[in-house]
Image (cartoon, rainbow, N blue to C red):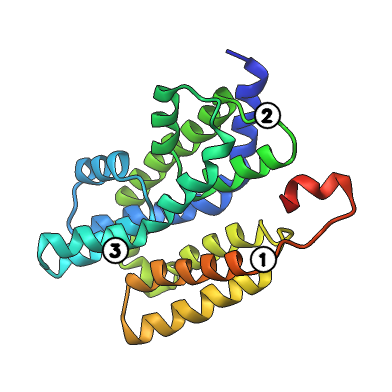
Amino acid sequence: MNRNEIISGIRAALPTLLSALPFGILLGAVSANMGLSIGEILLMNMTIYAGASQLVGIELFQHNVAPWVVVMSIVAVNFRHILYSAAIGSHIEHFKSRQKIAAFFLLVDPQFAESVKRSESGTRLTFTWYMAFGLTFYVTWQITAVLGAIFGKFVGDPRALGLDVLLTVYFLGLVLGFRNKANWLPTVIASGIVATIAYHFIGSPWHVSIGALAGIAVASALPLKPTSDPATAPEAA
């Protein structure tokens, strides 16, 4: 096991953690205020490990809706992970089968973004680096959720303080990280417009998947922009 790869993976995770940790604390606080015990919060975090869909599930649990509605809503929000796994497949094709299983479990938004950036920069995406990044994020996510559950009760409803905007800021940061990719702007605009329309006419959380599909359609229809700079060729690809 390469020590340098472990250190590199941990270092790569640290900047992303700064934006994600407040969201983990928010999740823990909201969960505790809705009646979940610390054990239940930790179990949910360790098994689902999906952030946004956990908030959706908690909201639906509170309103005592049918279990199948909860499951389908979580699937709708997590549909992007299917896209992530398809997109990252070529970058981890050298992983062994059991390594891919572990890799896909840890494939959350920051893991996908940073892994693709590393691979497209010309640096080999090793399993050691991938797991160092992923486990750093995974373990810290559990800790922050528990801290949010413990101290959230002293704050009250964190959404009343406007802390739920952290989710929007978090995803916006991930999207902006790909702003140098070909056809980034029209793809983002199409996704945003269609998701907004779907939110008003169909409702949440389905607008997430519908917006994602619209972005895929636009990206597929647009030709890749040619590049004459060899240094940027991996990004354009």
| Secondary element at image label 2 | loop
How many numbered marks, from 0 up?
Answer: 3
N-terminal of the two: label 1 or label 2?
A: 2
x 57%, y 12%: residue: 1
The image's mark for residue 56 is: 3
Mark 1 lies on residue: 184
- Which is in the foreground here, disc 3 or disc 1? 1
Residue 178 placement: quadrant: bottom right
Q: Amino acid at mark 1?
A: Trp
| Secondary element at image label 3 | helix
In x, y percent, where is residue 161? Answer: 42, 72
Mark 2 burial class by Cα count in 10 Å: few <14, some 14-19, many 20+? few
Q: Is residue 134 above or below residue 128?
A: below
The image's mark for residue 124 is: 2
For this orientation, the residue located farthest to the top is 1
- Gap between marks 1 and 2, in whole Å? 24 Å
For this orientation, the residue located farthest to the right is 228
In x, y percent, where is residue 78? Answer: 36, 56
x 89%, y 54%: residue: 228
Residue 60 placement: quadrant: bottom left
Q: Is residue 115 above or below residue 172?
A: above
Residue 103 placement: quadrant: top left
Which residue occupies the foreground of this view, 107 or 64? 107
- Left or right: where does residue 70 sit relative to residue 184? left
In x, y percent, where is residue 119? Answer: 66, 37
